[in-house]
Amino acid sequence: MDKEKIIAELNRHKKQPYLDYRLKEETESFTNLLFYTLFDVNTPVAENLDVLETKFSRLTDLACWEIQKPCSKVWENYVSRLPGILEKLNLDAEAILNCDPASLSIQEIYMAYPGFYAIAIYRLAHELYVQGFPLVPRLLTEYAHRQTGVDINPGATIGKSFFIDHATGVVIGESAIIHNDVKIYQGVTLGAHYVAKSLQKTKRHPTIMSNVTIYANATILGGDTVIGENSIIGGNAWVTASVPANSTVFHKPEIKIKTAPSNV
């Protein structure tokens, strides 16, 4: 074995000059501290904001590859929006508490509900996304995805009092728009009709109007698809066209039961 030759070949094929996995690791550390700063009663806000600023500066060094982009200005804008983000997250937690009969306390929502955690990290990532901060918003939501099974693209637009129940398997695409007081269950996909790079700048994902409930494993596809307010989308439904307000959409499977003869 020619070790030096192998090393040279490996280095020759490492072609991405900015592929530094420290960015991924430090984003996750930043996410954890930010989450605790917002919610944990024993975590000092003033002290932690200083630590978070230092951590964010490190993310800036790792993520901002184009020196002409003013990444150094992002933190000041971001931190000023944290109170508004926290206000929205408190409304999300209250919506979960009010809608889920299995919830025992508001503390349980914050600490034990994967849907709430996924929404929280999405909202924190979305603000960086709209500021054009590169890669870090996606790393934030992918960190939540890995922990909860919920994949929300940071580019999605989500209104107030959002509720994801059970969470696992939920997918919400980049250009999806979700209005206020929407409830979705496990396995729901808000996706695109087609996957093609040429569609990058187009609205590929559906719009969900206010007070809509989408039950488990429903799939709603297409940028022109609008689910009207106060509608209910039943479990396992496949929807590729708009639905009027106050509608109920359901999938009706054929179920057959075969009973074995009794041996008695």
Image (cartoon, rainbow, N blue to C red):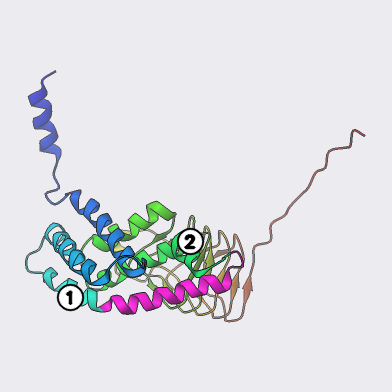
At horizontal 28% and vertical 72% (from top left) the residue drawn is 127
Left or right of 150 on screen, residue 261: right
Query: Dividing the image into 4 quarters, which one contains the C terminus?
Result: top right
At horizontal 41% and vertical 70% (from top left) the residue drawn is 176
Tell me which label, 1 or 2, sits earlier in the chain: 1
Position of residue 48 measured from the top left corner of the image (x, y, whole percent): 23, 66
Compared with 210, 260 (above or below) is above
Is residue 146 or residue 155 the one in the foreground?
146
Label 1, label 2: how many angstroms apart (C-alpha)? 30 Å
Q: Tell me the kind of residue under disc 1.
A: Glu
**In the structure shown, which secondary structural element does the residue marked by tag 2 occupy?**
loop
At horizontal 39% and vertical 64% (from top left) the residue drawn is 173
Could one spot residue 174 in this view of the protein? Answer: no
Residue sitting at the far right: 264
Residue identified by numbered label 2: 113
Left or right of 14 on screen, residue 157: right
Residue identified by numbered label 1: 76
Q: Which segment is the magenta one?
A: 81-102
Examine the structure image and report whether residue 37 is included in the region drawn in magenta.
Answer: no
Q: In the picture, residue 110 is in which quadrant? A: bottom left
**In the structure shown, which secondary structural element does the residue marked by tag 1 occupy?**
helix
